[in-house]
Amino acid sequence: MQSKLPIRVEKTSWQASVKEIKQIRSLVFVEEQQVPYELDFDGLDPGCIHWLAYDSDNRPVGTGRLLADGHFGRMAVLKPNRRRGIGDAIMRAVIKTAAAEQLPELFLHAQLTALPFYSGLGFIRYGEEFFDAGMPHIAMKLELI
């Protein structure tokens, strides 16, 4: 899916963007999806690469993170901004960075509702479904090399 509005995606760090990242993830995961705060904010953020997506008014509307081992997660787009290509733009930036870093693969744990989205980007599901934060998930990976 190509962007349906002007979207800017920037690679950032936890230290540089903690306020914006926390705001988006708190609204999406903690409030909307009822994920316990301690589960979402697991202490791994300072060691991750993060991305923030901004709308045409320069407001942060989406985020995601990548651990050094190629595990992508914490993709969150504010509800009013979904289905506008923001998640796609974030993922394309993540894939580009992971390829440049010569990671052999990206892997993630997708909520089942997001399976078509990640499949459309080339991710392949593996393993059995499992529950995380009370929601069904499936492991997925994308070979980069």
Image (cartoon, rainbow, N blue to C red):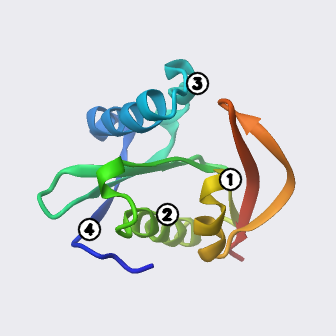
Nearer mark to the viewer, of 3 and 2: 3
Residue at mark 2 to residue at mark 1: CA–CA distance: 20 Å
Q: Amino acid at mark 3?
A: Leu
Q: Secondary structure beneath disc 4?
A: loop
Badge 3 crowding class, 10 Å Cα cut-off, few under 14, some 14 to 19, many 20 or more, is few
Element type at mark 1: helix
User: Closest to the observer: 79 or 145?
Assistant: 79
**x 28%, y 38%: residue:** 20
In the image, what residue type sits under mark 2? Val
What amino acid is found at the position of numbered circle 4 in the picture?
Answer: Ile
Residue 5 point in image, percent of width and height: 24, 73
Mark 4 = which residue? 7
Observer-side mark, 2 or 1, equals 1
Q: Where does residue 71 sit, x and y in percent of width and height?
A: 65, 50
* 3D distance between C-alphas at marks 3 and 2: 23 Å
**Horizontal and vertical percent for residue 2?**
39, 80
**Residue beneath label 3, please?**
39
Q: Are marks 3 and 2 in contact (CB under 8 Å)?
A: no
Q: In the shown orientation, is residue 145 left or right of residue 22?
A: right
Name the quadrant containing residue 90: bottom left
- Residue 66, given in percent of the width and then of the height, sits at 54, 50
Number of the front mark, 4 or 2: 4
Q: Give the residue number, with chain letter if any, for mark 1.
A: 112
Report helix, strand or loop for mark 2. Answer: helix
Closer to the chain start, of discs 1 and 4, is: 4
As drawn, 122 above or below 61: below
User: Distance of mark 4 from mark 2, alpha carbons?
Assistant: 15 Å
